[in-house]
Amino acid sequence: MPSARPTLSGYLIDPAAATILAVELDPTHFHRTLRRLIGCVDMEQVHLDDAHVAYCDSRRTTEPVTGLWTSPAHGSRPPIAGRAVIVGNDGASIPALPLRIFAATITAYRPVIIPDAVALARLAELHAAEQYGAFRRQVRIDGFQLEIERHRPLTIDDDGRKSDGPF
């Protein structure tokens, strides 16, 4: 009988989607698996606390940022940009906290661009039978506002179900 292939567990944080989920890591191709999950070529380790390490893209601050995340364990250091995989403190063991408890400590941030639209004039009423009473307006974009949304990441379990609380 062939022996079962050993695996490690970790947590994949995606701040752009504001999600965190448990992932299986192949220890024989550990770094390759991490790079595939994170979506990067070069990685670095960020020590979060005595029990957790984050693997993240080493070029995360030189490329466009779609999301950031912080952990109180990370202290007052700057947020981490992009996706990351969390593992145990030796870099190759399972995280010390259960997924939902760990997720409750994470805050994800996403940039949101809000256009400043200026309505110029109502162009024409469309035929009610064709467009159900819709009308068109001519607008001009006069600028943009940038805001940052803050979220607790949703945890995604093995069945693909999302939950937003630690319990």
Image (cartoon, helix red, strand yellow):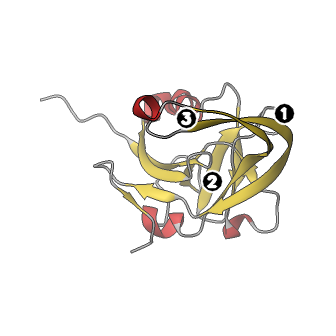
Q: Nearer the viewer, residue 10 or 165?
A: 165
Percent coordinates x, y for residue 35 in the rendering = 59, 30
- The residue where tag 1 is placed is 62
Looking at the image, tell me whether mark 3 or mark 1 is earlier in sequence order: 3
Q: Secondary structure at mark 2?
A: strand
Question: Are the two marked residues, 2 and 1, in contact with CB atoms closer than 8 angstroms?
Answer: no
Crowd around label 2: few <14 · some 14–19 · many ≥20 (10 Å): many
Name the quadrant containing residue 122.
Answer: top right
Q: Secondary structure at mark 1?
A: loop
Classify residue 153 as left or right of residue 49. left
Looking at the image, tell me whether mark 2 or mark 1 is earlier in sequence order: 2
Amino acid tagged 2: Val
User: Closer to us: mark 2 or mark 1?
Assistant: 1
- The residue where tag 2 is placed is 53
Classify residue 105 as left or right of residue 162. right
Residue under the point 67% across and 24% down: 41
Amino acid tagged 3: Leu
Amino acid tagged 1: Thr
- The residue where tag 3 is placed is 34
Q: Nearer the viewer, residue 153 or 57?
A: 153
Percent coordinates x, y for residue 80 in the rendering = 73, 51
**Residue lying farthest to the right in this orientation:** 142
Question: Are the two marked residues, 3 and 1, in contact with CB atoms closer than 8 angstroms?
Answer: no
